[in-house]
Image: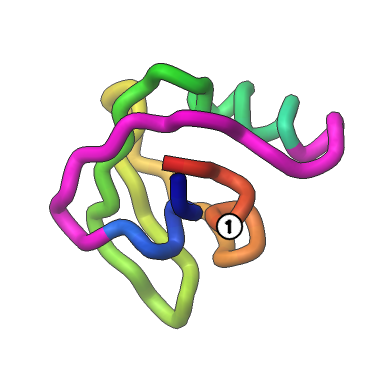
Amino acid sequence: MMPLTFANVGEENMIKKVGGNPETRKFLENLGFVAGTSVTVINEIGGNVIVNVKESRIAVSKEMASKIMI
């Protein structure tokens, strides 16, 4: 397992675990970051990542992306 921040652009990965405090986990799960869901990094800008998850394009901060394990 590694954080989403280490994923390569254009590579499809499976979310294994969403970490962080309960508030952060709920926030990420509401955005579609749920274990077992596939996620693809579209772009990375200054450590922040833009991903496709559940057919939505979402930008997450480096801090948030580091809590999503793939």
Q: Is residue 51 magenta?
A: no
Q: Which residue range is magenta in the image?
A: 8-24
Percent across and percent down for residue 37 are: 37, 21
Percent across and percent down for residue 1 are: 45, 45
Percent across and percent down for residue 43 are: 27, 63
Q: Give the farthest residue toward the left.
A: 10
Q: Is residue 42 left or right of residue 53?
A: left
Note whether 15 is above or below 30 in the view shown. below
Note whether 10 is above or below 23 in the view shown. below
Q: Give the farthest residue toward the top.
A: 36
The kind of residue tagged 1 is Ser
Colour scheme shown: rainbow
Q: Which residue sits at x=23%, y=61%?
A: 8
Q: Is residue 16 left or right of residue 22?
A: left
Q: Nearer the viewer, residue 46 or 35?
A: 35
Q: Which residue sits at x=45%, y=52%?
A: 2
Q: Which residue sits at x=41%, y=61%?
A: 49
Splitting the image into 4 quarters, where does residue 12 fall? Answer: top left
Q: Is residue 66 left or right of residue 8?
A: right
Q: Is residue 15 magenta?
A: yes
Q: Which residue is mark 1?
A: 66
Q: Which residue sits at x=14%, y=53%?
A: 10
Q: Give the farthest residue toward the right.
A: 22
